[in-house]
Image: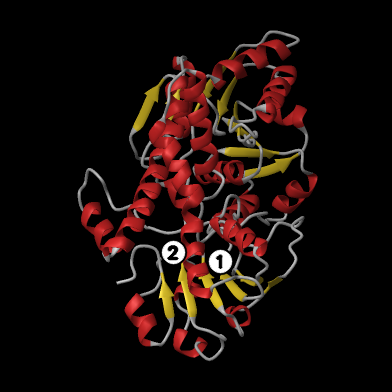
Amino acid sequence: MKILVIGTGYVGSTTAMVFAELGWKVTGLDTDVHKIRQLRQGLLHFHEPGLEDLLKKHIQSGQIKFTTDKDKAIQESDVIFICVGTPSRPDGSADLRFVKQVASEIGQKMNGYKLVVTKSTVPVGTQELVTGWIEAAQEHFYPFDVASNPEFLREGKAVTDALNPDRIVIGSESKRATNLLKSLYHSVKCPFVITTPRTAELIKYASNAFLATKISYINELARLCDELNVNVKDVAGGIGLDPRIGSSFLQAGIGYGGSCFPKDVSALILTARQNNIELSVLEKVVKVNQTQHSYLTDKARTRLGSFSGKKIAILGLAFKPDTDDIREAPALRIIESLLNERAQLRLYDPIATLPHDAKYESVAVCLEVEEALKEADAVFLCTEWPIIRGIDWAQMKDVMAHGNVFDGRNILNAHDMQALGYYYQSIGSND
């Protein structure tokens, strides 16, 4: 069975490499000639631990190849995974133009039965739309099925998650399609959730929205902990031992970011509104997340008096460690807020970089932590990279002009920092 993965971004590249690792012949298709050229050379165009090793392994083994030839790729495939982007529109809805374009091209170029699988995160009802788009584009009738098989990958842990999933969700009305998809995953040991396409699509959104809810819940609780002189880390540890709650996603900080949670929560809220349902809990989740970074900058402003003219270091740009993804990263919100108040910024991240089209004044990008901290009036810790966790703060005390540390990820120990003579402010764990 030959697999085609359309779209070689984060989800598509991971999907292609993992199916190659599972023993299938895989083709990756993209219209971006530069991306395809890089992939053919064994070079990944984003940072994801372990994925480039799989890429090089399976290019060499011949299990995977990459192309821009749509006609040949579609006609030679048995199963086609749609892994293109579904960015947010201004109103929060998912933009399906790339999914529609791919579905139409499949309809035009197919030459026999195809199983088409939406791997992209899409609104409820998209499977029906994809079916209609393929049918409308067919010049000659060929049978096909459209199924939903959402991904549940964590950036920075994608290879582990894909090879050792906690569940595989298959949404299909067709027994043939269901059996085909199950056969692709035959060597994977985990529970299978076999359901309708609409249910599968909603499971993906509901999963991300629930995890986002846990983050905003602990972040809002951290604000109360500050007022009560209670350590939110101890609270999170205590409630996380309850198996009904669990310890994951209970780390207080400056909020969630990335390509999934902000987009998916907004899309789910909009879907509810379109069906005359109010998801008030999720609306509050979004509000907390949008204001969480300002909770820390407000505390910094109280300490510094004003940001104008202050030299401030930002350590960490990525929304989480082990990724170069800065989409919706809280660090960017902090940067924008500080620049609006005329601060002088020095930025450091071991992997992530500012957008190529970003034109920030009063910003210097540094290659070393010490360079960013040199003569700084304050520092904001925005990503919990190991190199940032491991900073020798005793040594950095003489590097900074003033020892003001604002820990947006609760990385450090308040007592240790205060003993070194720093003014230390975290979120809900300053005791």
Q: Which mark is residue 409?
A: 2
Give whichever of discs 1 and 2 has the lower sequence position. Answer: 1
Q: Which mark is residue 149?
A: none
Q: Residue at x 39, y 63 (%)?
A: 427
The answer to whether 337 appears left or right of 23 in the picture is right
- Assess disc 1: are there few (<14), some (14-19) or many (≥20) residues with their C-alpha within 10 Å of its C-alpha: many
Q: Residue at x 74, y 57 (%)?
A: 358
Q: Residue at x 53, y 74 (%)?
A: 304
SS category of the residue bearing label 1 = loop
The answer to whether 27 appears left or right of 390 in the picture is right
**Type of residue at label 2?**
Arg
Residue 307 percent across, percent down from the top left? 60, 70
| Relative height, residue 114 to residue 281 (above, below) | above
Residue 357 percent across, percent down from the top left? 77, 55
| Relative height, residue 320 to residue 278 (above, below) | below
Q: For the view shown, which residue lies furthest in the top direction?
A: 141
Residue 332 percent across, percent down from the top left? 61, 58
Residue that badge 1 annotates: 316
Please tell me in which quadrant of the rendered image residue 114 appears: top right
* Cα separation between marks 1 and 2: 10 Å
Residue 339 percent across, percent down from the top left? 66, 64
Q: Are marks 1 and 2 in contact (CB under 8 Å)?
A: yes
Q: For the view shown, which residue lies furthest in the front direction?
A: 305
Residue 256 shows up from this direction: no
Please tell me in which quadrant of the rendered image residue 367 appears: bottom right
